[in-house]
Image: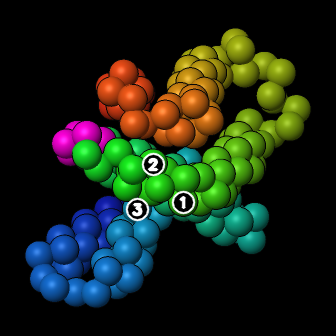
Amino acid sequence: MGWAAVAIAAAYIVLIVIMLTDAPRPIASITAMFATGSLCWNGHGAMTDGGVGWVHLAGNAVHLVAGLSWIGAIAAFLWAALRPQGAAAELSNDLDQFAKTGTVFVVILLITGIANTSFIVGWDGIAELVDTAYGRILFIKISLFVAMLVAAAANRFWLSSRLAASWSFGLLRVSLGA
């Protein structure tokens, strides 16, 4: 755990240094993905031993990167939505272009989330999750994920196509902020 914490801290220090320079965006993105993925070294992704442990660790790292990338994209869209309403057409285009990428993030989150749960409790333990603190926290996490999916669907299929209307722009801001 000590060396993992040192590696995580080093990854974030390198990321901060890169972000303060004029480094090319791909280098900053790769460094951010590595720093985010490294968080799994001190999480439940590190609990499994052997070859299966490496699969669990990698799955957890991918889960973290996909989740934080999705949330980061939402934050970027919220920032864009806070600009003057004249940028509605540009924001609508950006949201449309992100739809496929966002769907990939959601699929990755679902697959890695199911895999992580199976590594932690095993397939036999899934039925007993309701009786555990971990299971209740997982239920809350899944409920929030579903709420985000509902908001994403509303944004994608209803609000983003109506951005010219002032009421729609305001609702999109509220949805992204939530």
Measured Cα–Cα span from mark 2 to mark 3 = 29 Å
Position in image of residue 47 (x %, y %): 60, 52
Q: Is residue 44 above or below residue 121?
A: below
Amino acid type of the residue tagged 2 in the rendering? Ser
Measured Cα–Cα span from mark 1 to mark 3 = 24 Å
Query: In the structure shown, which secondary structural element does the residue marked by tag 1 occupy?
Result: helix
Amino acid type of the residue tagged 1 in the rendering? Gln
Which residue: 57% across, 30% down?
A: 158
Query: So how many labels did they put on this image?
Result: 3
Amino acid type of the residue tagged 3 in the rendering? Thr
Q: Is residue 69 above or below residue 74?
A: below
Position in image of residue 37 (x %, y %): 47, 64
Which segment did they paint magenta?
Answer: 81-85
Residue to which mark 1 is pinned: 97
**Lateral position of residue 177 relative to residue 54, left or right:** left
Q: Is residue 55 above or below residue 152?
A: below
Measured Cα–Cα span from mark 2 to mark 1 = 9 Å
The tag earlier along the polypeptide, 2 or 3, is 3
Residue to which mark 2 is pinned: 92
Q: Is residue 85 above or below residue 151?
A: below
The tag earlier along the polypeptide, 2 or 1, is 2
Q: Which residue appears farthest toward the top when viewing the image?
A: 131
Residue to which mark 3 is pinned: 36
Position in image of residue 53 (x %, y %): 68, 63
Which residue: 30% across, 42% down?
A: 81
Choose mark 2 or mark 3, whichever is in front. 2
Which residue: 71% across, 40% down?
A: 117
Which residue: 66% across, 69% down?
A: 54
